[in-house]
Image: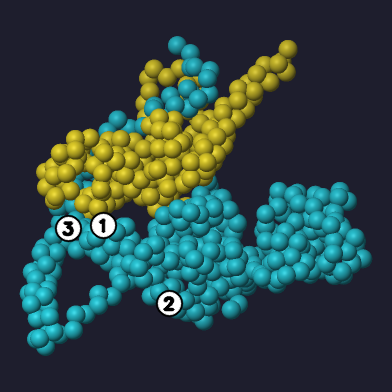
Chain colours: A yellow, B cyan
Amino acid sequence: MDRDIIRRAQDGDHDAFEALAIGVSGRLYAVARLILRDTHLADDAVQETIVTIWRRLPTLRDPDRFEAWAYRLLVNACADAASRRTRMTAEVRLLPRATASDDTASQLADRDVLERGFRHLRPEQRTVVVLHHYLGLTATEIADITGAPTGTVKSRIHYATAALRAALEADERGPAAAAGGGR
Amino acid sequence: MSAPRDPDVRIQQWLVGEAPNDIPHHVLSAALDRTRTLPQERSIGGRGLRGRVRLDRRRTLMLVAALVPVLFALAVGAGALRTPAPTVTPPASVLDDLRRDGRVRIAVRPDHPQSPLSGVATGFDTDVATALADRLGLQPDLVIEDVSTMLGPDRGTWDLALPSTPDWLIDDAAFAHSAPYYRWTHRLVVPAASAASSIADLAGGPICAVAGDPTETWLRGGYGGASASPAATSIVTRATDADCLAALTAGDAIGAVTAHLSDADISVIGEFRVIGGPDAEPRSVVVRRPADPGADPGDLLAAVDDAIGAMRADGTLTQLSERRFGGADLTGP
């Protein structure tokens, strides 16, 4: 991120803030959609995050930490959105699937299995999975964003990833077992 | 083309495939529209987010302009002039700060007394947190945190916390807590066929407790400030209530103290009989004590106590307890 743009936005320059928001919003939106698995909740979470970034930007002391700080606000907004989903369980709906013409059959199968496995994870586990496997952040960086101790983050990454791996492996054993039984 | 077999690569590939390429225009433009009419927050004195005085730029300038003549008069007067006594700025109020935001972050733990529903924790504390925020006139932002994080050295990322842990385990130096909003009952159970009628009959032991739970402390002495164990008996520990009951069934223990099972749970299982247990464990709402003499959480705590009192008086707490704990009201004062 451009330090000058951040400084100007901190001083109340709204044009600079717009440039900043345009630069970061795509990644924020992708992360929110992956964590929440719900378009409307992701829309709300990202809007709240952008508004909060604007309001609180003058309190950010180190512009080099802007991106981590923005992700922290987003993670909090996603937790808030997830709690709203708890109160609106009846309204939760499945996301429409994106078209993926070059998907192989196995990738399509992965998608179903991982989608189901992911939905069984707790919100904080989903968050670390997205931050670690999608953004490629380390446990220390995730700890900085989520406010959880590094050891807790490592544990969440371990157990969440293990759950997804187990879902994939169980899915593979299913067809294999069926094939073996026919011999 | 076949999919890679490395599970981590497959997880990463799935996430990348599921992520949208960009933010929808209407989402970004709506957010930017909102920021055009909102002032930015400014901090004075470089204090933390929650404890700071929030003023926009115009109000800051007005404040400075108002303070200059006062400071000048104080400087040149030096007692010769009868200047008004300087008023001591009261510490910022945490409650006022939250009410300016209109929101309150309330931490609840992901496990007991919550349970996962559709992948999201829901339960008694989430219900109480929502009702409490409503009584405070604030919009709740529920934060799901492990107790170790919530009450740990970093003290979590919340304004109010419902750790559902006994009051006596809360560090008084770092936190203050409300009056209890419920009291959890731990039960000493034996197999239905056992002749034991009190803990004294289990002196031979062993009695099973969930490792690290306050009930282990009860058996060893020290529960709620007690200095002695309730009976001289040997103790075995297991990871969960279910493991303790399994030990009871297998004959590896002759009694067990429940950590998280309600009376309704025990009744449903049906193979065990309650013969006692420690006094009910008081559980309260927690606020942080300020790290510096800045924001004062006293008014927030008083408002929480008032809200709990009102929810108890009008039956809200009872209703929530009975709904979540199999008809039991654990919310007596």
- Horizontal and vertical percent for residue B221? 74, 65
Amino acid carrying mark 1 in the image: Gly
The answer to which of B165 and B26 lies nearer the viewer is B165
Residue B240 at x, y = what percent?
A: 70, 51
Q: Can residue B77 be seen in this view?
A: yes
Q: Which of marks 1 and 3 is in front?
A: 1
Residue B78 image point, x, y percent: 12, 80
Between disc 2 and disc 3, the foreground one is 2
Nearer the viewer's eye, disc 1 or disc 2? 1
Locate the C terminus of chain B by quadrant.
bottom right
Give the residue drawn at x 29%, y 59%: B47
SS class, disc 3: loop
Q: In which quarter of the image is residue B48?
A: bottom left
**Residue at the disc numbered 2:** B302
**Residue drawn where x is 22% and y is 54% of the image:** A55
Can residue B321 be seen in this snapshot?
A: no
Rendered residue at 27%/35% (across/down) = A26
Disc on the earlier residue, 2 or 3: 3
Q: Name the residue under label 1.
A: B46
Name the subunit of mark 1.
B
Secondary-structure class at tag 2: helix
